[in-house]
Image (tube, rainbow, N blue to C red):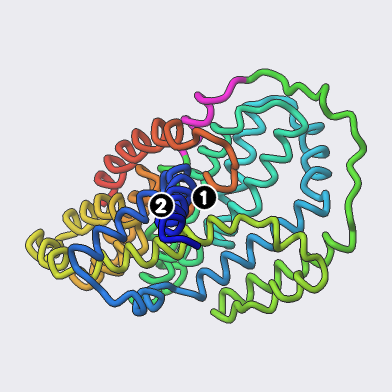
């Protein structure tokens, strides 16, 4: 190849990469942030993979594979068909899915609840025309609100529960007022966002068959995988098994979502480790409950609530105030909670970011006031 062709090929290669990245706003922001961090505070590139929580990435990959397998089995379409013929109104359906998502998130974590409820909502949308963007938005808010209640609901609660030394019942009792208040708020928001019009079931004319073998294996594997992931033993065995048995399941998962998660770990942990950030938090003085709460709610908007609570725990031992703060911080901008990013990605809908923030940012502001009053 001539020198001219080499020079021409390189710009074309990087141009194609940039075009692919620029179509995904979150990915573009993460790539830009990584470049800025590497210019401002250079770090050996070979050390960056060490910032990634690969156990979390493997867990996410396993959940993507299992939910995709259940989807391809036809079970979700079958379940959606049964559900829409028992729930006759759009608003009732929305409230039911919000309650289901919140309830599951208290015991299965907010991420796992999304992997169960969002695909169900998408299957419902195929049967009856639904405002799917609004539905995914309230489901995302629901898993963030419901997961507040228990130590198992989300990673930040699990971290605070383990480091605080309080018992399970005491933790639930402390977080119950905030969870209850935000669920009431979400119920009001959901009631206002959806109409009481009947569902149009004219499109539900096909028979909905289920691949019982694929569905049964996936459900059993789902339960086993969640138990293994909870014990931090999730590994690549699941992916290997499906590659050998049903490789189309693995090929059709959202690989870009996994890349986004990897970059989030690298960028957020890199940023959180900067001395300037530590000094800024130290100057804020988060020793009082109010300041710890405000710091958690606001800092989550910049670096997500899990890195925020890990960072703030070095400066405050008031676990309840921190839990309130980072729980509220899960609302607002999408990066406030990884569950938000998962919900938007699972929806597969274009133009989700603007409507999501039109709802989530006002919700965050009201939630801030509620949390402030309860502290």
73 inside magenta stretch: no
Q: Quadrant of residue 129?
A: top right
Q: Is residue 149 visible?
A: no
Find the magenta span and give its range: 184-195
- Tell me the tag on residue 48: none
| Residue located farthest toward the top when viewing the structure as drawn | 197
Please identify the dominant SS of the magenta region: helix
Q: Are marks 2 and 1 in contact (CB under 8 Å)?
A: no
Q: Which residue is mark 2?
A: 11
Q: Residues within 10 Å of mark 2 (few under 14, many from 20)?
A: few
Mark in the foreground, 2 or 1: 2
Q: Residues within 10 Å of mark 1 (few under 14, many from 20)?
A: many
Determine the residue positioned at 22% across, 73% down.
Answer: 314
Give coordinates of residue 295: x percent, y percent. Answer: 21, 55
Q: Earlier in the sequence, mark 2 or mark 1?
A: 2
Image: 235 above or below 203: below
Most foreground residue, 263 or 64: 263
> In the visual, does 28 lie left or right of 232?
left
Q: Quadrant of residue 195?
A: top right
194 inside magenta stretch: yes
Most foreground residue, 297 or 23: 23
- The kind of secondary structure element at disc 1 is helix
Image: 256 above or below 232: above
Q: Which residue is mark 1?
A: 143
Give coordinates of residue 311: x percent, y percent. Answer: 25, 68
Determine the residue positioned at 30% across, 56% down.
Answer: 33
């Amino acid at each position: 190849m001539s020198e001219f062709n080499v020079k021409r090929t390189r710009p074309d290669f990087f141009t194609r990469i940039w075009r692919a990245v620029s179509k995904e706003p979150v990915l573009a922001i993460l790539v830009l942030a990584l470049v800025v961090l590497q210019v401002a505070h250079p770090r050996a590139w070979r050390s960056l993979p060490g910032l990634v929580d690969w156990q979390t990435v493997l867990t996410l990959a396993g959940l993507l594979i299992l939910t995709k397998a259940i989807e391809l089995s036809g079970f979700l379409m079958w379940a959606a068909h049964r559900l829409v013929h028992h729930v006759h109104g759009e608003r009732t359906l929305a409230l039911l899915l919000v309650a289901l998502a919140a309830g599951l998130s208290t015991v299965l974590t907010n991420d796992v609840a999304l992997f169960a409820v969002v695909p169900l909502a998408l299957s419902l949308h195929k049967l009856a025309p639904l405002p799917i963007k609004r539905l995914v938005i309230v489901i995302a808010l629901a898993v963030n609100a419901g997961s507040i209640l228990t130590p198992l609901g989300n990673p930040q609660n699990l971290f605070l529960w383990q480091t605080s030394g309080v018992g399970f019942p005491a933790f639930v009792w402390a977080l119950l007022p905030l969870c209850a208040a935000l669920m009431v708020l979400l119920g009001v928001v959901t009631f206002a966002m959806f109409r009481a019009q009947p569902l149009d079931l004219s499109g539900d004319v096909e028979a909905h068959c289920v691949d019982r073998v694929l569905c049964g294996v996936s459900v059993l594997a789902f339960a086993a995988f969640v138990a293994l992931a909870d014990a931090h033993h999730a590994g690549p065995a699941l992916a290997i098994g499906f590659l050998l048995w049903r490789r189309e399941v693995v090929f059709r998962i959202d690989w870009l979502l996994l890349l986004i998660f990897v970059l989030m770990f690298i960028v957020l942990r890199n940023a959180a480790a900067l001395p300037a950030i530590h000094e800024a938090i130290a100057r804020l003085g988060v020793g009082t409950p109010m300041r710890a709460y405000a710091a958690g709610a606001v800092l989550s908007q910049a670096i997500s609530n899990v890195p925020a609570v890990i960072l703030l725990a070095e400066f405050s031992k008031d676990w309840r105030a921190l839990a309130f703060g980072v729980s509220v911080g899960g609302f607002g901008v999408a990066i406030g909670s990884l569950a938000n990013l998962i919900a938007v990605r699972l929806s597969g809908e274009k133009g989700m970011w603007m409507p999501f923030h039109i709802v989530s940012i006002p919700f965050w502001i009201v939630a801030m006031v509620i949390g402030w009053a309860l502290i």
